[in-house]
Amino acid sequence: MTTSPLLDASGVAKNYGAVAALRNASLSVLPGEVHALMGANGAGKSTLVKILTGAISANAGRILIRGEARDIRSPAAARRAGLLPVYQEPSLIPDLDVLSNLRLTGTPVEPFRAWVRELGIPDLDLRETARDIPLAILRVLDLARALAVEPDVLLLDEMTAALPANLAEKVLEVVRRQGDAGRAVIFISHRFVEIAALCDRATVLRDGETVGVVDIEPGVEERIVELMLGARIVKTKVQPRAAGQNAAPAPARPRIAVRNLRVGSKLSDVSFDLADGEVAGVVALEGQGQDELFAALAGSIKPNGGTIEVDGSQVKFTHPIDAIRSGIAYVPGDRSEALAMQRSVRENIALPFSAALRNWGPIPMRKERDTVLGAIQRLQIDTRAQGEVQRLSGGNQQKVTIARWIAADARTILCFDPTRGIDVGTKQEIYKLLRELAGHGKSVLFYTSELEEVQRVCDRVIVIFNGRLVDIFPVEEADEPALMRAAYGLPRGAKADVGILADPSATSSDSPSPNASDAPEASP
């Protein structure tokens, strides 16, 4: 392996207004190397990948391919530079057949056919429409299409996610051979087992900066976790909740009982309980099944298997309105999904009043006005710009989203990264509000991409990896290093060699849940 990099990116920065998505990222990949790109949620991996592949332009930085400076401002420019990505979502146009997709990108057909066979699909019909092909096969076709043009640098983003074992193994074999042929592969994965088996080195990002490059060797996962967390690794208690804020003991019958829930290929056999008066946290890296879990509980998608019980009765949601009628409300991280941006604060908060009408008749305006005003005052929403919600700050918009369900007296609130992109002061107000709701007997399921938030808010923490519930922590044990290890599929309390880690789909055997009813009912 030579010391001259095949790809050398340095000083890469990207700002979106006042928000710095990347501050000072660097990545150097050698010929013949399989190089892991790692980082916690929000570290900047996706932004760096998009810059390298021409999807977005950097504000600063330099990219060299084989020592030559390249101005990569489009996917076509990245392709000409010899850098090709395979993203998590298939890029074939659904309404075209495979052959037309190949022609659209100028992919040579015979090399593509050869790679498809090499990847374990011997009988592909090129006339088949892309939308009729299973997701796992589409991902393999994307990889074959990239390999057919022999790129200098191949970038794989969670390539084996959602692949069956036989196809995943074929993909890993091909990746190894790319390195053997002198080309480079940038490999993004949340599975330490794969990184240990494939990669030579890893670059770690934190808060938009490259904080370390490490050789992959036995025991390196501890060092990688340290780099991901930085100074926060010493904070085992971020901000303990005030005395008396702990939730009451779980009743014999939980508010929500999830049993063996399955959603497509993303979520498998997930079981847990959520009690009245409890804030249960959910921690997971990107794309591990948390989106599907919340969507199923909110009635947005239909599970493939398992059951959901509300107050002891099994329910089947075919629409979000079914979940709302069961007292379950959803607060998304993206406020635009929940709010009518051109409507007023009052209209947005009062929406459940009109939605709940069963028959034609007058809306109880006085009750609506009093309830809405009470919610505004309780959340201290700034209504100076209440003519349109879109004129409010992001923090106040999120308050409006939560206020709607407080006004509607929802018993269970599903909060999916509710503090994303809002200021520190408003975050503190939302933490306090969620604890107050639990104190009044409400139940809250709280997903966060910021690990330090769980000790500010939660009573227990559920960790999901590879679509499965792998651990449940009492908040006293949910420090950031422990959560990060679990989120990457590492067993609790063990510093295992990366080469001999347990099956990432298995639940940690030395990590019993605080309540027996919380453990998955069936082992994967």
Image (cartoon, helix red, strand yellow):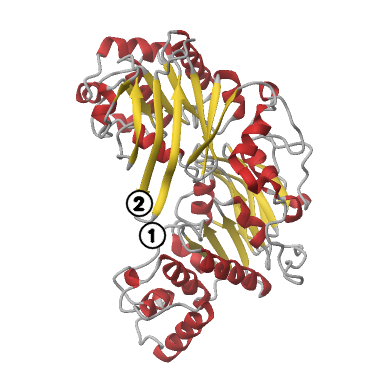
| Residue that badge 1 annotates | 337
Kindly identify the residue that appears in the image at 59 percent across and 40 percent down.
Answer: 228
Residue 269 visible in rendering:
no
Under mark 1, the amino acid is Glu
Helix, strand or loop at disc 2? strand
Q: Is residue 203 above or below residue 259?
A: above
Disc number lying in front (2 or 1): 2
Q: Closest to the observer: 417 or 269?
A: 417
Tell me which corner region of the image, top left, top right, bottom left or bottom right, holds residue 217: top right
Locate residue 42, reporting x and y percent.
49, 46
Tell me which corner region of the image, top left, top right, bottom left or bottom right, holds residue 355: bottom left
Kindly identify the residue that appears in the image at 45 percent across and 67 percent down.
Answer: 395
| Residue that badge 2 annotates | 16
Q: Earlier in the sequence, mark 2 or mark 1?
A: 2
Label for residue 451? none
Kindly identify the residue that appears in the image at 24 percent across and 28 percent down.
Answer: 76
Under mark 2, the amino acid is Tyr
Q: Closest to the observer: 33 or 346?
A: 33
Q: Is residue 135 above or below residue 294?
A: above
**C-alpha separation, residue under disc 2 versus residue under disc 1:** 20 Å
Helix, strand or loop at disc 1? helix
Kindly identify the residue that appears in the image at 33 percent across and 14 percent down.
Answer: 150
Please give left or right for residue 199 compared with residue 78 in the image.
right
Q: Closest to the observer: 312 or 18?
A: 18
Please give left or right for residue 358 compared with residue 54 in the image.
right
Tell me which corner region of the image, top left, top right, bottom left or bottom right, holds residue 48: top left
